[in-house]
Amino acid sequence: MKKNIALVTGGFSGEAIISYRSAITIDSNLDRNLFNVFKIDINPQGWFYELTDGRKVEVDKNDFSLQMDNEKISFDAVFIGMHGTPGEDGKLQGYFDTLKIPYTGCSAATSAITFNKRYATAVAGASGVPVAKSVILIKNNFGSPDEVIANLKFPVFVKPNNGGSSIGMSKVNDPSDELGVAIEKAFQEDDQVLVEEMIEGREFTVGVFKSLGNIIVLPLTEVRAHSDKAFFDFEAKYQGKSEETTPAEVDEVIADKIRDMARKVYSVFNCGGVVRIDFIYNAKEGKPYMLEVNTIPGQSEASIVPQQVRSMGWSLKEFYTKLVQECFDS
């Protein structure tokens, strides 16, 4: 008998636009021989399922169900395809936990910790994972940019502490180079701002997932922002201003170090489903530094994880089936 799967998309942040792109790919590749798929759009106006005739059915939040004519639709599992809040920061995960509905991806606790970049680097660093030195600034609770100058070496990255897709992020080469402007830009996106020392090296990103209890690392991708971009920002990620090489052309000794660290990070945070972990490999020190953990990585046709899945020789249909099956088995 087919399982009823709710594909949840949308969200309450600027990342909703990325959520809708991911949902198109996921919806197109969920196996209809195995699943009945209902795409649920959660947005500031409400929680809705749209019928083929354009009518919208509101979700009953008491039990996360749909009333369609004379039939009540309940869900066996949820595929979370939402970037930003409330789908990537643990809020929806906690809601589904209370209803005892399984879902793809990480737990509420893991999602909340990794969504907060400062907490994530603190946990990783305490577990022996190399991370960059950083300072956290709380809105209306810090004196001036001089606090940053006293504790960090430049260049630095200034970014919202919560969130993803590099929205509100800036690179500042020296203290006189518009540090204050960069901090204010980040504060427009979040009440907490992370200022982090730049690690020199090559940037790699890799998808990691669990299937049948085994942690599987997808082929590495090397990311290079175009010469007119100072770093891998929103434009580089989503508007074609970067070069991504999958699989990465890298010495196997280096690749093994990154893969081993990716497995360690996945285990440290007790991740579930597929995550994407970003690293900088510092050749001088001979080790990869963890930048961040993305618990809901992009799934558009051009996104990195689908690239890596295809590079591994799998179809997205096979991959998504494994992710759904894992949420039942875990």
Image (cartoon, rainbow, N blue to C red):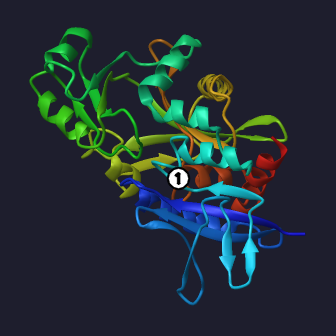
Q: Nearer the viewer, residue 228 or 113?
A: 113
Q: Is residue 318 visible?
A: yes
Residue 45: x and y, percent? Answer: 41, 67
Q: Nearer the viewer, residue 217 or 213?
A: 213
The outermost residue toward the bottom is 53
Is 116 drawn above or below residue 297 in the view shown? above
The outermost residue toward the right is 1
Residue 148: x and y, percent? Answer: 21, 17
Where residue 30 sits, quadrant-wise, is: bottom right
Identify the residue under disc 1: 298
Question: Which three-letter amino acid code belongs to the residue tagged 1?
Answer: Gly
Question: In the image, is 266 to the left or to the right of 190?
Answer: right
The residue sitting at 66% across, 45% down in the picture is: 105
The outermost residue toward the top is 150
Q: Is residue 287 visible?
A: no
Which quarter of the image is occupied by the C terminus?
top right
